[in-house]
Image (spheres, rainbow, N blue to C red):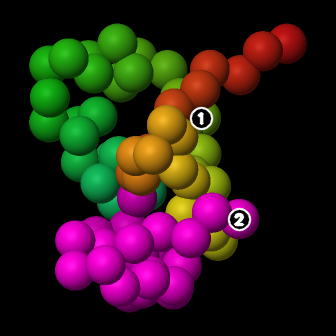
Amino acid sequence: MKTLVNSDGDSLAPACLFGIPDPGEHQPREIADRLVASLEEFAHLRLGQPAIMVLFRCAPKVKAGRRVLGDTSRPTR
């Protein structure tokens, strides 16, 4: 795994970069539910029962020297 370095030149451990939030309003499920309920852009998701799943990564993902904070994908059949 590639070692990440901060702007001071210090090596960063994966645990310093990512953490799982405490239960409550900052959980991904809670955020997704609020966005679907309140934003017109997601009105089509209110018509059915969308399956929004969240997967946490244990190690940082670096692509082309940049840290990837999130990905989305559409399931295939």
User: Which residue is found at the position 39% from the left and 72% from the top?
Assistant: 5
In this rendering, the answer to whether 6 lies above or below 30 is below
Q: Nearer the viewer, residue 35 or 72?
A: 72
Magenta stretch? 1-28
Residue on which the image places disc 2: 1
Query: What x and y, as percent, mark residue 16?
Result: 42, 85
Alpha carbon distance from label 2 to label 1: 32 Å
Q: Nearer the viewer, residue 46 or 7?
A: 7
User: Which residue is found at the position 39% from the left and 21% from the top?
Assistant: 45
Q: Secondary structure at mark 2?
A: loop
* Quarter of image, res 3: bottom right
Q: Secondary structure at mark 1?
A: loop
- Say which amino acid is labelled 1: Ala
Residue 47 painted magenta: no
Q: Is residue 63 left or right of residue 24?
A: right
Residue on which the image places disc 1: 51
Seen as rendered, the residue at the extreme front is 9
Residue 16 painted magenta: yes
User: Which residue is found at the position 14% from the left and 19% from the top?
Assistant: 40
